[in-house]
Image (cartoon, rainbow, N blue to C red):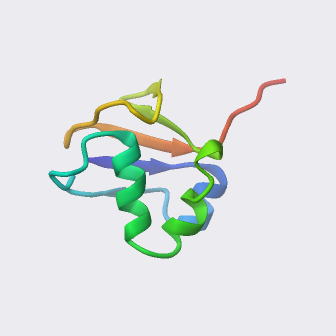
């Protein structure tokens, strides 16, 4: 799966994007976020406050219980405000 990171999440992880093979046990966005945290720092630091993490799967905003597959593009970013 293709992962894209934005704003302070990108800065904290130190990468704008990466490609990961989805482990079999990762079936939802929540599972993915838990898996990323298991990879250690800096993932654990930037993803610890899930209320501040938004996710889009294939360019559509989704809740954290949304199912994912290995061929998805997943964007992880902080809340967005307009003005």
66 and 10: which is toward the camera:
66
Q: Residue at x 44, y 75 (%)?
A: 40
Q: Is residue 32 above or below residue 43?
A: above
Query: Is residue 71 something that shows in the picture?
Result: yes
Measured along the vertical axis of the image, is residue 7 above or below residue 80?
Answer: below
In the rendered image, the quadrant that contains the C terminus is: top right
Relative to the observer, which residue lies in front, 63 or 60? 63
> What x and y, as percent, mark residue 14?
53, 68
Residue 80: give x, y in percent of width and height. Answer: 69, 33
Q: Position of residue 34 (x, y in %)?
A: 40, 56
Q: Residue at x 21, y 38 (%)?
A: 69
For residue 61, side relative to residue 46 (left or right): left
Q: Is residue 53 left or right of residue 40?
A: right
Say which residue appears at 49% left-offset and 37% top-offset: 55
Horizontal relation, residue 15 to residue 22: left or right = right
Check the image and report above or below for 57 versus 60. below
Q: Which sits in the foreground, 15 or 72?
A: 72
Taking the view exactly as shown, the residue that stands out farthest to the bottom is 41
Residue 13 rendering spot, x and y as whole percentages: 53, 66
Give the tally of numbered discs: 0
Which image quarter: residue 21?
bottom left
Let me know if residue 14 appears in the view. no
**Which residue is at the far left?**
24
């Amino acid at each position: 799966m293709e992962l894209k990171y934005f704003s302070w999440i990108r800065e904290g992880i130190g990468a704008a994007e990466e490609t990961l093979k989805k482990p079999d046990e990762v079936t939802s966005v929540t599972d993915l976020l838990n898996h990323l945290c298991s990879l250690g720092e800096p993932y654990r630091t930037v993803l610890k406050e899930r209320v501040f993490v938004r996710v889009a799967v294939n360019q559509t905003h989704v809740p954290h219980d949304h199912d994912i597959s290995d061929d998805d593009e997943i964007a992880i970013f902080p809340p967005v405000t307009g003005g």
